[in-house]
Amino acid sequence: MDIKVSIIVPVYNVENYIRRCLESLINQTLREIEIILIDDCSTDNSGKICDEYAKIDPRIDVIHNEKNIKQGLSRNKGIEIARGEYIGFVDSDDYVDLDFYEKLYDCAIKDNYDIVKGGRKDIFDDKIVISNLNEVILDGLKKGYPIFSLFTYEHWSAIYKKDLLDKNNIRYPNLSNAQDMLFLFFVGIKTKKIGFVNNVFYNYYVNQNSTTFRYSKKYFENILYVDEIRLSKINEMDLNKEIYDYCYENYVNHLISNYYNLLKIKELNSLYKEYYNEIIKLIFSYKYYEKIELTKIKDIILGMDDTKKLGIKTLIKMILQKILKKIFCKNNKE
């Protein structure tokens, strides 16, 4: 059987959800699929449930990791052995519509797309919210923005041409979070054609009680690392200033929004100044901005009154004045 789509599922301690996920996969209307389950040393019954389903459906392969390597590296294991023309990813506490992969694959082969993206539903305990990211991406493409600057999350809502990943050696980084951002960044750089199917959905389960991981020190360190890579890469690329500024502003805003999340967490107050200083360094890697000594940053930003140079400087001033108010005026009276 020629495999059209390889579906890679990292699994860790999801015994309450994994059956729902697997039922949505084995019952896909597209039958020419393989399902690669990577059990990342689960301590509950998740691994046993995976083995149980592998006995039921010969299209399922189960890999039991010898040590816990997290989702990104587990997905990479799946990519290495995948035999499908396209690859899809599912988180083990989520599920997909039964015709999800058939509709995405049919769209992909009609016009030889590198990526085809479906819709997304956020499944809360009391409501369902449909994402509009497809509309945002399409609108940005019409304006001439590149794919890598638009398709920055919802990585599991799409399928990707296996050759695209292999020929360009695109894999997930070894991070415990934000790994999808770098994966999509490098996939988007190499993607020439992306298609969309809006009437079929990846169902993302929102566990509102899961906050421990989000508020770890490592979470914020990984955000810094990802945006450092992205800012460094666009500095190397031959982008016109409008597109460069669009990317730059998105990455800076991502840094700043996470900085404000950090400020809410008293347990991590030792990280405030370190994170702030790293943000300053990254912000002043802006390609079209004169080099500034970090020790002079306060006076320069607060005194930035040149009205002839609005735009990116104004953005920096507005963002950093908010930070300065919180950090220097409140905490560091120097």
Image (cartoon, grey):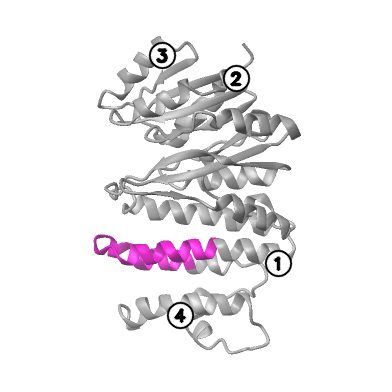
Q: Which residue is mark 2?
A: 83
Task: Report the mark closest to the observer, 4 or 1.
Answer: 1
Mark 2 and mark 3 residues within 8 Å of each other at the beta carbon: no
Mark 3 and mark 4 residues within 8 Å of each other at the beta carbon: no
The residue that appears at 67% across and 71% down in the rendered structure is: 288
Q: Which residue is mark 1?
A: 242
Please give the label number shown on residue 54.
3
The image shows a total of numbered marks equal to 4
**Can residue 150 be seen in the rendering of this structure?**
no
What type is the residue that disc 3 sits on?
A: Ala
Q: Which residue is mark 4?
A: 321
The residue that appears at 58% across and 89% down in the rendered structure is: 305
What type is the residue that disc 2 sits on?
A: Arg
Magenta range: 251-279
Query: Which callout, 2 or 3, points at the residue further toward the start of the chain?
Result: 3
Query: Residue 24 in the image: x percent, y percent?
Result: 44, 27
Magenta stretch: includes residue 286: no
State whether residue 33 is above or below residue 225.
above
Q: CA distance from mark 2 to mark 3?
A: 17 Å
Label 3 crowd bin: few (<14), some (14–19), many (20+), radius 10 Å:
some
- Report helix, strand or loop for mark 1: helix
What type is the residue that disc 1 sits on?
A: Glu
Task: Report the mark closest to the observer, 1 or 3.
Answer: 3
